[in-house]
Every structure is written in C-alpha cells, then in structure tokens.
Amino acid sequence: MVSTINATSTGVATTADNSGILKVQSNGVTVTALAWVNFNGTLSTPITPRAAYNVSSVTKNGTGDYTINFTNALGDANYSTVGSCNNNGDNSINRVFSVTYVPTTSAVRVQTPYGATNGLNDVYAVNAIIFGNS
C-alpha cells in the first residue's frame, strides 16, 4: 500500500510505502530516499548512527570529514545527497554540508563546515538523505 502524505497543486507528491521508504514524484519522475542517517559527528570511528535506513556505519576520516557506508549497495552512483549539521545547544543555525570526492555505490563522503570561518568541525548532529531514481 502506498499512501500520499503530502500533495500540492504544483504536481509534486510525497509518498511512503509500507516499509516507510520516502518517494517524491514530480512531472512523472519518481525519486526515492535510498538511504538516510542521523549521527553524532563528535564520536570516534566507527560511528554507530542514532537512526538510519540502509546505512551500516559512519567512518570518521578526520575532523568534520565522514564516510557514510551503505548497508546494501545502490544501483548506481548517480544519486544526490542532501544534509545538514548543527552543534547541540549553541543556538546556531543548521548548515548544509558538502559532499566530497566521487560518490560510489557503497558509500558517500561528506564534510561538515561550521563556525565563523566555515572550517571543518566535528558537530553533534549530522543528518543526510541520499535520493536517487527508484
């Protein structure tokens, strides 16, 4: 069963199936959340995610530099990664992180710029969603 959880007059619909997989459809193209993760970037490697779908672990490569490892390989590496990061309790805004290196079917590497200089920092809350064609 697929249920629509949000639809607009612009022709964009957001749905979730029985397994909870998020799908976005616009102009006849369906994009699926192939993986998502929420983790604490201040921990040592390997980082166990707080919550995740199709993410086995997170590897800390250095300060503010992480590799998100997929549980099941994706069909191809032509996906988009969307994410944000924030420090807990410092009243600063969420920041969008950057995807670095070439994504693979088994992992994506991200960095968390933070602070006044936007240098790389370990942050308490890192969230990522990997979207691709279903």
Image: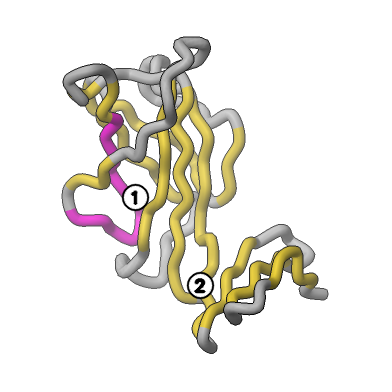
**88 left or right of 13?**
left
Q: Position of residue 90 (x, y in %)?
A: 45, 11
Specify start and end residues of the magenta stretch as a single range. 102-112
Residue that label 2 marks: 31
Residue at position x 44%, y 55% in the image: 130
Residue that label 1 marks: 107
Quick one: 108 or 7, which is closer to the camera? 7
> Which image quadrant for residue 66?
top left
Measure the alpha-carbon separation of dots 1 and 2. 19 Å
Disc 1 residue type? Answer: Ala
Disc 2 residue type? Answer: Val
Q: Where is residue 122 in the image (x, y as percent from the top left)?
A: 32, 18
Q: In this view, does 74 lie above or below 63?
A: below
Q: Is residue 118 above or below residue 102?
A: above
**74 left or right of 112?**
right
Q: Is residue 59 magenta?
A: no
**34 left or right of 94?**
right
Residue at position x 43%, y 26% in the image: 93
Quick one: 107 or 12, which is closer to the camera? 12
> Which image quadrant for residue 52?
top right
Q: How crowded is mark 1: few (under 14 residues within 10 Å), some or many (20 or more)?
A: many
Dot 1 lies on which element?
strand
**130 left or right of 112?**
right
Quick one: 129 or 73, which is closer to the camera? 129
Q: Position of residue 78 (x, y in %)?
A: 31, 69
Evaluate if marks 1 and 2 touch, with contact meaning CB atoms under 8 Å apart: no
Residue at position x 17%, y 49% in the image: 101
Name of the residue lying farthest toward the right: 1
Q: Position of residue 99 (x, y in %)?
A: 26, 46
Quadrant in the picture for the N terminus? bottom right
Circle on res. 58: none
Q: Is residue 111 magenta?
A: yes
